[in-house]
């Protein structure tokens, strides 16, 4: 018996019509449930929909991009390509113009307080932004022109990105955003960001103890106290015997560089008033 009725779509009926070389598929996206198959859709369209349904950050993230860094190494731009720098949870990523204002917390050297759990409510409601620029060209960045109501500093941390690995305070965009999120108690979003980089786990490993201590602080003053106590403990000279002391006196100067690269204890290293060496890169 011949049945002239057209075949209904099914997961087994995936062959393309004759003459149609474009790949087609059948898909329905239900944000509250599993993905099911129906109707025709191009593969590229399907991929776009799948990307939009992937788990995104709970926090609105943004950045000012001054184009000073190598685009291929810029972690902020990579986050934007992954759609993790967002204007809102449902929209595409964006970059702030210099004249654009941002109502959330902005990580900036012009801040007078460290980011802390006190800022979590603002971050949750209005978001978190970072300034993407070269550490070697900070003087060229018009920080004071950036319209932000709540600029904040980051406490002392060590970079793990390939460009500035091991350098104190010279964090990349993703490291800065992730550190601020962890300090404020939003560790899940921080892990989501760092998970996009092969070296992301190294940042957590290098700073695990400090990040945990910072996250337990209730305000900026407590964070500065933890920072200074940690630096004092980790840069204090070790006790030596009389014999060892004599040996050290004969080689005076061998320990003169023991504190190279460490910030002064009376203020935060991320403040705008610091010097860079000529060989520093982005």
Image (cartoon, rainbow, N blue to C red):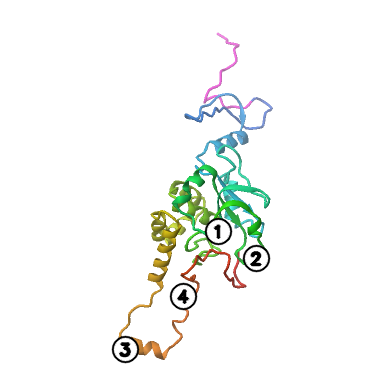
Q: Nearer the viewer, mark 2 or mark 3?
A: 2
Q: Main secondary structure of the magenta part?
A: loop
- For marks 4 and 2, the one nearer the N-term is 2
Q: Nearer the viewer, mark 4 or mark 2?
A: 2
**Residue in view at x 48 percent, y 71 percent:** 264
> Quick one: label 2, few (<14), some, or many (20+) residues within 10 Å?
few
Q: Would you identify the image quadrant in which residue 274 lies?
A: bottom right
The C terminus sits in image quarter: bottom right
Q: Would you identify the image quadrant in which residue 151 lies?
A: bottom right
Image location (x, y in percent) of residue 213: 39, 58
Above or below residue 85? Residue 134 is below
- For marks 2 and 3, the one nearer the N-term is 2
- For marks 3 and 1, the one nearer the N-term is 1
Image location (x, y in percent) of residue 247: 37, 89
User: Among all residues in the image, which is located at the extreme top?
Assistant: 1
Where is mark 4, residue-wise?
A: 259
Where is mark 2, residue-wise?
A: 139
> Quick one: label 4, few (<14), some, or many (20+) residues within 10 Å?
few
Cα–Cα gap, marks 1 and 2 = 16 Å
- For marks 1 and 4, the one nearer the N-term is 1
- For marks 1 and 2, the one nearer the N-term is 1
**Residue in view at x 60 percent, y 66 percent:** 281
Image location (x, y in percent) of residue 56: 52, 41
Where is mark 3, residue-wise?
A: 243
């Amino acid at each position: 018996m011949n049945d002239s009725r057209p075949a209904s779509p099914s997961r087994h009926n995936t062959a393309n019509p004759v003459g149609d070389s474009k790949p087609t598929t059948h898909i329905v996206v239900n944000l509250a449930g599993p993905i099911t198959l129906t109707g025709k859709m191009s593969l590229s369209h399907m991929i776009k929909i799948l990307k939009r349904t992937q788990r995104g950050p709970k926090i609105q993230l943004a950045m000012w991009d001054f184009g000073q860094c190598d685009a291929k190494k810029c972690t902020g731009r990579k986050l934007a390509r992954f759609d993790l720098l967002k204007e809102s949870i449902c929209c595409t990523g964006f970059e702030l113009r210099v004249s654009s204002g941002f109502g959330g917390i902005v990580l900036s050297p012009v801040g007078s307080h460290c980011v802390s759990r006190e800022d979590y409510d603002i971050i949750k409601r209005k978001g978190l932004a970072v300034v993407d620029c070269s550490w070697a060209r900070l003087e060229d960045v018009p920080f004071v022109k950036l319209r932000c109501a709540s600029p904040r500093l980051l406490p002392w941390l060590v970079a793990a990105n390939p460009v500035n690995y091991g350098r104190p305070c010279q964090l990349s965009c993703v490291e800065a955003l992730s550190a601020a999120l962890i300090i404020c108690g939003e560790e899940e979003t921080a892990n989501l960001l760092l998970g996009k980089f092969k070296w992301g786990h190294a940042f957590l490993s290098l700073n695990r103890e400090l990040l945990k201590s910072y996250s337990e602080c209730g305000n900026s003053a407590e964070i500065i106290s933890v920072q200074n106590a940690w630096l004092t403990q980790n840069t204090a000279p070790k006790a030596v015997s009389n014999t060892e002391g004599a040996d050290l006196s004969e080689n005076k100067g061998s320990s003169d560089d023991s504190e190279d690269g460490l910030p002064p204890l009376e203020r935060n290293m991320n403040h705008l008033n610091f010097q860079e060496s000529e060989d520093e890169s982005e």
